[in-house]
Amino acid sequence: MRRRTPAGLVGAEPGPAHHIVFDGRAVPALSGQSIAAALWADGVLAWRTTRFGGRPRGVFCGIGACFDCLATVDGRANQRTCLVPAEPGTVVTTQEGHGRADLAV
Amino acid sequence: MPTSPYEFLDLVVIGAGPGGLAGAVTAADLGKRCVLLDGGHSTGGQYYRHPAPGLGAARPDRLHHGWSVYTGLAERLAEHERAGRVEFRGGHHVWALERTDEGFTVHATRGPDAGDRVAVRARAVLLATGAYERQLPFPGWTLPGVVTAGGAQAMLKSGLVLPGQRIVVAGSGPLLLAAASSLVTAGARVPAVVEATGYLAYARRPHVVAAVPAKLVEGAGHGTALLRHRVRPRLRSAVVEAHGTDRVTGVTVARLDADWRPKPGTERRIDCDAIAVGHGLLPQIDLATELGADTLAGPDGAVALAVDAGMRTSVPGLWSAGETNGVGGADLAIAEGELAAHDLAGAEPKRSLRRRRARLRAFADLMAAAHRPGPGWTGWLRPDTDVCRCEEVPVAKVREAVEELGAGDPRTVKLLTRAGMGWCQGRMCGPAVACLSAGSGSAASESGAGVGAAGPDRRPFGCPVPLSQLAAGEPDA
Ligand SMILES: Cc1cc2nc3c(=O)[nH]c(=O)nc-3n(C[C@H](O)[C@H](O)[C@H](O)COP(=O)(O)OP(=O)(O)OC[C@H]3O[C@@H](n4cnc5c(N)ncnc54)[C@H](O)[C@@H]3O)c2cc1C
Ligand code: FES
């Protein structure tokens, strides 16, 4: 039996995948997916480390309420990836701590 | 509908879930001109969340019960939009409601830049901002792969993705069965659905349950899907620990007593690569409580807006529909949206609508009472368990603030420990901090009253607002 998938369940026929860039690596994304969804589909669950413990974090609430899924997107720190759409060529970088280390003087 | 700078609307509806959508189209049916705002880019809210058009889903109904109800509402909305009676504006996060002489100014943000600030003026506001999930921390809950039950639903319904292949569903409340049933139908394995209560409370009030046949059909649908995939709920049990270093690799499940205290010696380990967890929902009512709207605590301890039979809040000109009035599901939200629209338009609703709402509310109260968290849940915490995810504040710090520094309420605990001061403004840790602040053995902690009932949370901004927009003058839209 063919394995069931979410896309198979709803009879989805998305166009060809485009790509976003995650920490320098191309990750496929489907039109209409959020950045977080594209990363999950690629098996990536964490893209931030916490400010104090340096612990990995990714999506928790999935609806924009918890702020655990923050990443640096196209150079802008602290973006909620569960809300931001994955556009072709979007550059996503793992965010460490405040995400502003590069601005520190 | 073009809105000129000084245009004044009859109504702004905040939230395009079942409640707000039904409210907006019914108000338009009754001749009102309104704008429907939502932070998301499409209508539907949590229940009718669906794949973005780009994903080309031919059968979105397979992830929803009652999909045709949504498409019916969406068609009516489109018709009213064509006639210029309603305008849906997605991507608008409302951060404050301001009362004015003529009604309200609704402040929203569309993005990070100074020019993204929007203000809409109207005589009346219908608040339909829904709910967010109540979380209770447990050791390991900050590991990647631990997601909320509603979040797993949301990511699946909108992005067609799963957090893992073997997903334990845990916590309490009807959303767990809905989530588990979608996850297995979409191809995940669900080795266990772990529910903290029994379902006995439902059986004790059979007449309330029997009065809402649609709920039974929906419940039976989840049950059938779960049986087909051999998923059996483990009742009176909880995930007391998630294992793993960089992501979840398994959980420990233990049996609970009637107060939700874990029973020693009953622990069992289950392998998994993700956990979907939630303990019911909490109404999202900050926009109204900032205006001083009256609230009341529901049977599950969650604080909701107090409304009259016409869905009017205590703030003149402000109505509320759906889960802002207490959690109760999509059908109830729709009934309340329709009732609110009639009331604000001065029209008499059908008696059957009022009766439907009363039946669904009674069922919601029964559910809420059945799944009210017991005070013993703190028994699964360890001193190093983070309570506040944002500020990384462990249980030991909160207990120290209460027991050694004498903090007797959540506000003082927050000031001493920073728990609840992070980005999420206490939405994730609020219930837990309230419980722990009540101290062990106090009346509040024994009754479980801390779990969401410590009075409405005060949040001056309904969502984060870029400073540049606060500094900028108020625009017109
Ligand atoms: C994450 C999550 C997943 C859920 N999944 C299910 C499910 O699968 N099955 C089920 O039976 N029930 C589910 N529920 C329960 C669900 O809340 C109700 O069944 C139903 O959707 C409630 O309708 P509503 O209109 O009251 O609110 P909602 O459907 O929650 O709609 C509220 C809307 O308001 C918008 N909003 C909130 N705040 C603002 C703001 N400040 N500015 C602008 N817009 C705002 C939100 O974006 C949302 O679209 C879920 C709840 C949550 C929180
Ligand atoms: S996952 Fe919670 S804000 Fe994105």
Image (tube, rainbow, N blue to C red):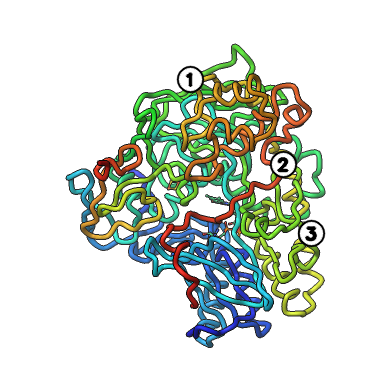
Chain on which label 2 sits: B
Query: Residue at coordinates 62% horizontally, 59% vertically from top-left?
Result: B287
Give the percent coordinates (x, y) of residue B449: 73, 35
Residue tagged 3: B358
Above or below for B39 versus B166: below
Query: Between marks 2 and 3, how big is the CA–CA gap?
Result: 18 Å
Q: Can you identify the residue that label 2 sits on?
A: B300
Residue at image point 40% right, 63% down: B111
Foreground: disc 2 or disc 3: 2
**Mark 1 on the same chain as mark 2:** yes
Q: Residue reaching furthest bottom?
A: B83
Q: In the drawing, does residue B395 fall left or right of residue B303?
A: left
* Amino acid carrying mark 3 in the image: Ala
> To which chain does the residue with label 3 belong?
B
First in sequence: mark 2 or mark 3?
2
Where's residue A58, x and y in %?
38, 40
Q: Amino acid at mark 2?
A: Asp
Real-space CA distance between mark 1 and mark 2, rounded to the nearest whole angstrom: 30 Å
Q: Secondary structure at mark 1?
A: strand
* Residue B182 visible (yes or no): no
Question: Could you say which quadrant of the image residue B370 lies in?
Answer: top right
Side of B31 where B443 appears, left or right = right
B195 or B11, nearer to the observer: B11
Q: What residue lies at 65% left-to-right and 65% top-to-bottom?
A: B334
